[in-house]
Image (tube, rainbow, N blue to C red):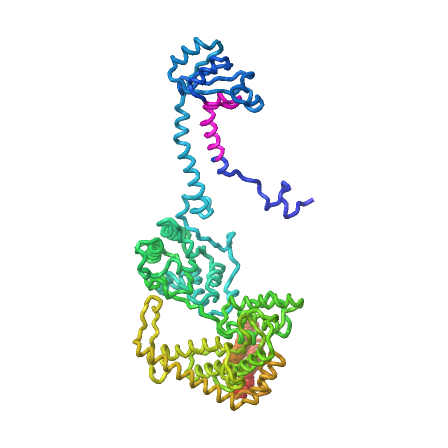
Amino acid sequence: MAQPNNMLPGGNKPGKKMPGFNLSWLYILIIGGLLYLMYSQNGQSSAGGIDKEVDYTTFRNYVAKGYAKEVVVNKTDGNAHLVVRPEKVRDVFHLGTDQTGSAPTISTKYPDVSTIGNFLDSSYKGSVRYEENDHFFSGIISSILPIVIMVFLWFFLMRRMGGGGSSGGIFSVGKSKARLFEKNGKNATHVTFKDVAGQEGAKQEIREIVDFLKNPQKYTELGGKIPKGALLVGPPGTGKTLLAKAVAGEADVPFFSMAGSDFVEMFVGVGASRVRDLFQQAKEKAPCIIFIDEIDAIGRARGKNPTMGGNDERENTLNQLLTEMDGFGTNTGVIVLAATNRVEILDPALLRAGRFDRQIHVDLPELSERVAIFKVHMKPLKLDNTVDIEMLARQTPGFSGADIANVCNEAALIAARHNRKEVGKQDFLDAVDRIIGGLEKTSKVMTEDEKRSIAIHEAGHASVSWMLQYANPLVKVTIVPRGQALGAAWYLPEERTITTREQMLDEICSLLGGRAAEELFTGHISSGALNDLERVTKRIYGMVAYLGMSEKLSNVCYYNAQGEYNFTKPYSEHTAELIDQEVQNMIAEQYARAKDILREHAAQHKELADLLVEREVIFTEDVEHIFGPRPWRSRADVLMEEEAIKLADERAKKLEKEKAEKAEKADTDATSQAKDSQVSATSAPTETDAENSTHDAESKGTTDSESAPKAEPSDIEDSTSAKENTDKPTTHNE
């Protein structure tokens, strides 16, 4: 019978290993043996019981009274030992023999050998034994043993602390901690560029580096050189580390991965040593790639902190990294990838050409990229037919790839919580609300007046934003408490490349709509507008101080990129007063504008607030039913329409190209058939047959040549008509 796959010939499972010998136990045994040898030298006489030390006079009295069974005199130590007779044990120790042992002793220090010898000769008739000890070995042990113990303890602790658990212990503290990924190795990663959705520009630049390592002749023949380093820059969660994993999975070369914090150690010089060791290993396996994640841990700009000296450990590590990346030494075939989300604090010497030649920006995904990311993370989920990926992508602006992955996972958890077999659209919407707004607080109790006030506030936001052209399109309004918010209005933010002054003012006016509705329709204002006022103030100050969008301070920017290191404002006190005044004026204008819109549509606002109190959650369709459709198209709709036009044009061009290729192939086949017919006619044995064959060939060639070109205009006409049919709906929509 064949053995099972999970069993080895010996009957043991492959995962179960025999216990190995630990070297630490050997050290413990050696030290224990030395301690035994050290302390057993003087313990021979007291091996049979307890030992009591007395003065020399008392020792003589015991001997004179006949308490001694045996006397041992050590000439080397100057000690004398008396073995007490069993019947005299209680008189001397006041204990029984079961407590003192079989041979209890009394010891003392004698003044001189001759003195004690004369006393024993005159007063003691029993056995007397003289002995001498060689203390050379015990002295060496007693002097060296503490040093050995301290060295062992230091070695043991440093092996655990400094070596990071590596097999080399303290002697490997300066070795690199980089993990090596090889395509067919045990640490091989299975992430490829297909797993990275969106970020096409970043993937293209990264793919060039991988392609160079695979086919260097393609670039070197033209005189080009591969960049020595590439820096992945972008907000957290955008996929910088994932891109590096994809490089490790795609490249056929060794891939070293290490975090920036792995260079930092408590010992001076360890960081620089690890940098040297890392590049030494990379040179041995060149061509290869080194990836340093969170490089800002060691790449911070030098001299920014005046309290630290210029010779600290972090700067030494950075200096060594700068030297290895572009110094006198050559690192041919070694490419350095690094990732950070704090590029502004990196040292300029690290960012210059020759070290990190490229800065690859991995930004937050756009609308089309979010659609692709949702598709990637939805693959393992069981979805129903209600899920609208495009709508989810539009509802998650500013979400990174990690955020979208969190949304998909949260939606699955919500569906499982409600015992559903598939994940639906509502689960994803609840997941987005959960991540943005927080957990829904169904236990919070509110009075009818509080509920009415919140409804009026949220209906004010919805009403003002619906009547403004550049305000974000409304998705839903709710008065259900979430997190720290008592209510919320959800929008589809417009992801604009540039933002005009009118667009900003419309958004600010919609934010002030809640406070304006409270003042108009309740007669008082509340603390519910705290978040709105915070956002309005920050945005207005940005418009005035940074963007130069005010009347009195137009075209002036007081933005200071290095403001975190300065303690003074880049403008005077008079300018600060002007900024404050302009901010107050602009906020007052938009607040009055919001009030005017609400007065004009007071009836619709009341109807919307009543509906919100009744249902607690209303959607775009409800607002559209009350106010009517918006006369303005959202930017997202325009972009999606343009994307559809682009895809239709690409499909039409592809169809036209395929038909042209088919026509060309048919023409080529007809020409080859005509040539074959002519060759067969030439090889005929008789003149008559040759003439007939030639005639047939000519007639056949004429027929084929006539029929082949006729196909071209027909096919071109069909493709043109197909393109026209494809373009018609687009033209109609525009």
Residue sticking out furthest to the right: 1
Say whether residue 44 is magenta.
yes
| Residue situated in front as seen by the camera: 49 or 355 | 49
Q: Is residue 330 visible?
A: no
Judged left or right of residue 725, residue 59 is left
Q: How many marks?
A: 0
| Residue situated in front as seen by the camera: 21 or 81 | 81
Name the residue rendered at 56%, 80% in the picture. Answer: 453
Q: Is residue 137 visible?
A: yes
Name the residue rendered at 52%, 88% in the picture. Answer: 631
Residue 69 versus residue 176 in the image, above or below: above
Q: Position of residue 385 (x, y in %)?
A: 64, 74
Residue 435 versus residue 719 in the image, above or below: above
Q: Position of residue 313 (x, y in %)?
A: 35, 53
Say whether residue 345 is magenta.
no
Q: Position of residue 441 (x, y in %)?
A: 59, 70
What quarter of the picture does the N terminus occupy?
Answer: top right
| Residue situated in front as seen by the camera: 575 or 702 | 575
Residue sticking out furthest to the bottom: 600
Judged left or right of residue 97, residue 221 is left
Name the residue rendered at 31%, 78% in the picture. Answer: 575
| Span of residues in magenta | 28-53
Residue 679 versus residue 326 in the image, above or below: below
Q: Position of residue 11 (x, y in %)?
A: 64, 42
| Residue situated in front as seen by the camera: 382 or 431 | 431
Q: Residue 695 falls in which quadrant of the image?
A: bottom right
Q: Residue 314 falls in which quadrant of the image?
A: bottom left
Name the residue rendered at 54%, 66% in the picture. Answer: 405
Q: Residue 505 falls in which quadrant of the image?
A: bottom left
